[in-house]
Amino acid sequence: MIIKRIFDIICSMCGLLFLSPFFIIIACMIKASDGGQVFYRGVRVGLHGKLFSMYKFRTMVVDAEKIGGPSTAEDDPRITRIGKFLRKFKLDELPQLINVLKGEMSFVGPRPEVKHYVDMFTEEEKSILTVRPGITDWASIWNPDEGSILAGSPEPEKAYMEEIRPTKLKLQLKYVKEHSFLNDMKIILLTLKTIFIK
């Protein structure tokens, strides 16, 4: 939808300009904490199966992916002190405005997954790749904090597969079947409500 892309471009540009002072402050805090890189660039599967780098503020120790799996509990020892703060208020997600501006993501759409999980898609679930992935969707509203569900689990990966992924996929399929600009606005408002209530 052209109107959706125009909305994404205008709002992501405004967001990046307005939030630039906060970006600088957060970047300095991350750099001062351990001297590592500010951004985390996670490879995700996007529209039509195309791989792209999804930007986040780094919330885990350097090379965290080499010492653990893709599922992260809120008590994961790889999460840094500043990372816990950023995750609590979803501030680590802000750099995804860059992905939205570039057209790799949208404000609303199924959360992009790592290739490991996408390779498990059934034929029906592959339809999720026919829409642009987003920062938020129905699944994000249903479960705004995956980390808290996985916390304390001896096997976070197994817990994700059994307790989160099935419902997440159902809600992503629901979005694909019913997506419209009006529904996108509804999801954005519900997402903001969820964040402020939290």
Image: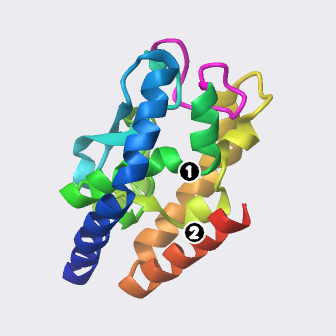
Magenta-colored span: 66-80
According to the picture, the residue beneath numbered tag 2 turns out to be 191
Q: Which residue is outermost to the right? A: 152
- The percent coordinates of residue 158 (x first, y second) are 67, 30
Q: Is residue 131 left or right of residue 154?
A: left
Q: Residue at x 56, y 67 (%)?
A: 138
Q: Earlier in the sequence, mark 1 or mark 2?
A: 1
Viewer-proximal residue among 56 and 157: 56
What kind of residue is marked 1?
Lys
- The percent coordinates of residue 36 (x first, y second) are 40, 18
Mark 1 nearby-residue class (10 Å; few <14, some 14–19, many ≥20): few
User: Toward which corner of the image does residue 169 lie, by quadrant?
Assistant: bottom right
What kind of residue is marked 2?
Thr
**Magenta stretch secondary structure, dominant:** loop
Q: Which secondary structure lies at badge 1? A: loop
Viewer-proximal residue among 54 and 37: 37
When the figure is inspected, residue 145 is found, relative to residue 40, above or below; the finding is: below
Q: Residue at x 28, y 77 (%)?
A: 7
Marks 1/2: CA distance?
A: 11 Å
According to the picture, the residue beneath numbered tag 1 turns out to be 90
Mark 2 nearby-residue class (10 Å; few <14, some 14–19, many ≥20): many
Q: Residue at x 70, y 35 (%)?
A: 159
Identify the image quadrant of the N terminus: bottom left
